[in-house]
Image (tube, coloured by chain):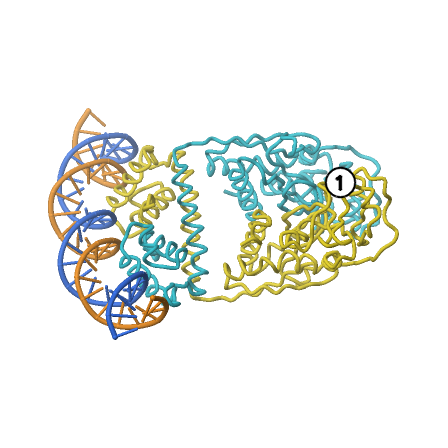
Chain colours: A yellow, B cyan, C orange, D blue
Amino acid sequence: MPTRLPPLATLQAFEAAVRHQSYTRAAKELALTHGAISHHIAMLEERLGLRLFVRDRNRMVPTDHGRILVIKVRQALGLLERGFARAGQNEHVSLTLSVLSSLASRWLVPRMASFVEQYPDIDLCIDVRAGLADLMAGEADAAIRYGTGGWPDVQQVRLMGDELLPVCAPHYRGGALPKTLDELAGCTLLRNPWVPWEPWLHAAGADIREPKRGPVFTDSAVLLDAAAHGLGVALARRVFAEGDLQSGRLVRLFDIFAPDPSSYFFVWRTDHPQIDAIDSLREWLVEQVGRGASALRA
Amino acid sequence: MPTRLPPLATLQAFEAAVRHQSYTRAAKELALTHGAISHHIAMLEERLGLRLFVRDRNRMVPTDHGRILVIKVRQALGLLERGFARAGQNEHVSLTLSVLSSLASRWLVPRMASFVEQYPDIDLCIDVRAGLADLMAGEADAAIRYGTGGWPDVQQVRLMGDELLPVCAPHYRGGALPKTLDELAGCTLLRNPWVPWEPWLHAAGADIREPKRGPVFTDSAVLLDAAAHGLGVALARRVFAEGDLQSGRLVRLFDIFAPDPSSYFFVWRTDHPQIDAIDSLREWLVEQVGRGASALRA
DNA sequence: CCGCCGCTGTGAGCCGAATTCACAGCGCTG
DNA sequence: CAGCGCTGTGAATTCGGCTCACAGCGGCGG
């Protein structure tokens, strides 16, 4: 695919011409003659088959086509300007990301290699803590939070929702996995105080109440480990179980999902001095979410 | 400022070389010889004073500098590719933005000329309604909502917080404006059932209770009009009053602000077919917020 | 109304830059 | 150790951008 793109000088000429609404003033800014600008624009218009300027008395007014195009051109030129200005300054940025341990171990860390590869200038510090880090107090630069959104004072973007589904080890009960809700009732249902079974049981139309007995784990990741070791059936968040399901460490039971009203949010503050790095991190996270589990197959 | 940027062909060569980790394969893709790629990279490295590639057996591996730089280059090239591919297709997009009437009249509409100017390919439909538009049902493509965030199923970004401050007409009471809290107690306090006076009175340390008498307006914009016509003192949201304060239609009383726990959010759904246009709208809104009231001075 | 002034359109010619070509050097592999 | 595949490098060539000079056009002041 050879370059269908006009030369950079042409784009700069076009951008300046739109800004000044005059070829001669644009030429002056770029230390060229008005003829050069005129040639550039003519080339561009012929290439696109569009008029980019119309004369209005003694001004050159960009057409709608021109105004639409100049937005992208400006963004691109800006990116390059900043990219090359900063190149070699090698500003190693360190970002502290506060995240729940279960999400860190089951979702974030398995994908982090791609981040380190893509952004070698950003050193991520994964800060695992029980509660919410106070971004405004500088406890972290950004965070991934689980909830329904609406935290005060911070910018937030929803990363992913979640679904609950029952999983267990493939060798659980010697491989005699439960196939019906009645058989499930005879299994050990592993419990997490923050993730009740009831919504799923309700969605499945089961006549089983919230289990009152069986092991309890307060951490989702540990709960899955327990299930993988054959201790019982776990009600797993899909994003956490994905890796184990693919590796065969866990298998899915039933085809019924219960939606989880909460979501994962990326939150940050807009007035952070290293906002560019935070933007990069956010874009990477959103991209990872979009890829789903496919990022793990590679 | 003449071009400090390398030619586009050089950037494309660099990008392809990073992708293929090989000059010859990059050359093949661009229908060039390996020598051209080599010259391009050498030029780039000399310009920057940095090594962008190191040999690793028979591969050319980008250095950290190279990997940092290629991100911006890729983004810029992508913008241009898409910009030029779509140029002239003239896809006129129509976006319906649901917004409260007060915000529309006092904040959005005064700035909209800049949007129309910048994005002539996007036709905005400003849909004013009392309640929340249901984005998932297609009632609107995006919305500006007032509240604390955390709406389900939609992506959201906080636009601006707000502050409450008392304002009145400069000729109110023949120009004898209240200078003390006691004098304020003797004024007519205009009321809005959704915006109580109490938080501000509390912040001011006043001994006045929530006013029980005086005109009531359910719409913030109408309330401000009433104040501007000398009907009394209004407790205004700063963003709404800004224009009137600058024009002298209203004047500010006291230097005490009460924070408003709610904020304005831009909300949208990520799976919208015209997500590019929504991104443009969001970026424009965020930019307008960043400019504050200065956009009105122009 | 006319002539000047400032602007853009256009073609010829020049100059610089990008590309190719050919060859050297280097590491890996059989 | 020879051959292969890759990159580095310099000289020659080719291509494209820039300038220059002139024409055309509209506005503005006399």
> Looking at the image, which is closer to me, A31 or B278?
B278
Residue B126 visible from this viewpoint:
yes
> Looking at the image, which is closer to me, B219 or C21?
C21
A96 left or right of B77?
A: right
* Looking at the image, residue A115 lies above or below residue A238: below
Instruction: Identify the residue at image location x=36%, y=36%.
Output: A61
Task: Please tell me in which quadrant of the rendered image residue A86 appears.
Answer: bottom left
B67 left or right of B258?
A: left
* Looking at the image, residue C2 lies above or below residue A191: above
The N terminus of chain A sits in image quarter: top left
Graded by Cα atoms within 10 Å as few (under 14), some (14 to 19) or many (20 or more), the crowding at tag 1 reads some
Query: In the structure shown, which secondary structural element does the residue marked by tag 1 occupy?
Result: loop
Give x and y (percent) for residue B34.
Answer: 29, 58
Q: Amino acid at mark 1?
A: Val
Task: Please tell me in which quadrant of the rendered image residue A99 appears.
Answer: bottom right
Give x and y (percent) for residue B63.
Answer: 43, 65
Instruction: Identify the residue at image location x=67%, y=33%.
Output: B134
* Looking at the image, residue B267 lies above or below residue A265: above
* Looking at the image, residue A192 lies above or below residue A47: below
Residue B258 visible from this viewpoint:
no
Instruction: Please state the chain letter of the residue tagged with numbered disc 1 in the rendered image.
Output: B
Task: Please tell me in which quadrant of the rendered image residue B145 appears.
Answer: top right
Give x and y (percent) for residue A50.
Answer: 33, 33
Instruction: Identify the residue at image location x=24%, y=44%.
Output: A35
Give x and y (percent) for residue B251.
Answer: 65, 43
> Looking at the image, which is closer to me, A215 or B115?
A215
Q: Tag count in the figure?
A: 1
Instruction: Identify the residue at image location x=32%, y=65%.
Output: B46
- Residue picked out by circle 1: B195
